[in-house]
């Protein structure tokens, strides 16, 4: 792993340096994000002031031990949860004070999700699963079908279009999930342990697709426990105890 910079001091309220990005636009920005969960009279602060900028074309791994705040941070990035304090800008939009319906709209239009457990709808076939986000975005049936067909071919599933998820291997199901994530041409693709349920061969095939997406300029943010998986990315954000411990970037 070739690194041009590293900051190993925990910084609760300031962004950790991640290189010069004069030519890249900021696609997401976290400003002093805090997240507290309340359980009766008890409160647990999981994120203690996270400040990070993510840039167009970044391929980022978010890492750290269990309980460090990775999943909470991913939920906020994915507009699945809101911070207790601080601001989260997705593109130019401040999502921090959005209502649930506004979050749902921006989530469907600007984000693509890839989960460890695939999260496919078992009653729908491959093509229908890929098309589903377009239905909620108001695309016509014809346009949805054409876009989904193209993406199915792109991930090598053109001969599995009428198969249900339970008729597919784990690797094939994750390919469906990738196509579904791409179908709205999202600003950011969020992947949570994307190869966690796959064998080595299938996992490598999925990671090659991620490499191709990165080469095409897509912005990917991946949560992983695996150093080996993280080696595929170009930037590594490591959390510890709800803080940014380090933010490192590959030289090229």
Image: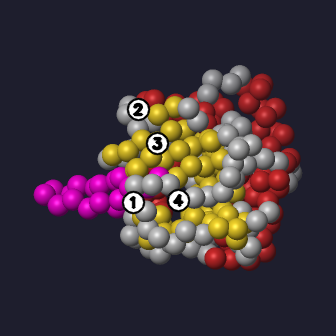
* Extreme-left residue of the structure: 41
Label 4 sits on residue: 16
Picture disc at residue 88: 3
The residue shown at (57%, 64%) is: 247
What are the residue bounds of the magenta stretch?
34-51
Determine whether, in the image, residue 38 is placed left or right of residue 5: left
Q: Position of residue 133 (x, y in %)?
A: 63, 36
* Residue 98 covered by magenta stretch: no
97, above or below 74, in the image: above
The residue shown at (42%, 41%) is: 87
Label 1 sits on residue: 12
How dense is the environment of label 4, judged by Cα within 10 Å: few (below 14), some, or many (20 and up)? many
How dense is the environment of label 1, judged by Cα within 10 Å: few (below 14), some, or many (20 and up)? some
What secondary structure is found at the residue carrying circle 3? strand
The span from disc 2 to disc 3 (Cα, nearest Å) is 10 Å
Give 165 or 78, whichever is nearer the viewer. Answer: 78
Label 2 sits on residue: 98
What secondary structure is found at the residue carrying circle 1? loop
Give 236 or 204, whichever is nearer the viewer. Answer: 236
- Looking at the image, is mark 4 or mark 3 nearer the viewer? 4
């Amino acid at each position: 792993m070739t690194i041009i910079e590293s900051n190993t001091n925990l910084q609760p309220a300031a962004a950790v340096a991640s290189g010069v990005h004069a030519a890249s636009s900021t696609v997401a920005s976290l400003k002093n994000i805090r997240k507290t969960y309340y359980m009766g009279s008890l409160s647990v602060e999981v994120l203690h002031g996270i400040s990070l900028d993510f840039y167009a074309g970044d391929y980022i791994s978010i890492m750290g031990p269990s309980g460090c705040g990775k999943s909470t941070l991913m939920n906020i990035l994915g507009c699945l949860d809101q911070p207790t304090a601080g601001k989260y800008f997705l593109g130019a939009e401040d999502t921090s004070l959005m209502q649930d319906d506004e979050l749902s709209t921006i989530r469907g239009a600007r984000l693509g999700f890839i989960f460890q457990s695939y999260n496919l709808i078992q009653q729908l076939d491959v093509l229908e699963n890929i098309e589903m986000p377009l239905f909620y975005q108001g695309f016509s049936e014809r346009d949805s079908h054409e876009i989904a067909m193209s993406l199915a071919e792109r991930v090598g599933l053109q001969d599995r279009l009428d198969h249900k998820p339970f008729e597919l291997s784990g690797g094939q199901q994750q390919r469906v999930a990738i196509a579904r994530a791409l179908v709205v041409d999202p600003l950011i693709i969020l992947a949570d342990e994307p190869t966690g349920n796959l064998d080595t061969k299938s996992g490598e095939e999925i990671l090659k697709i991620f490499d191709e997406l990165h080469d095409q300029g897509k912005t990917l943010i991946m949560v992983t426990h695996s150093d080996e998986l993280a080696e595929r990315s170009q930037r590594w954000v490591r959390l510890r105890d709800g803080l940014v411990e380090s933010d490192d970037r590959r030289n090229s």
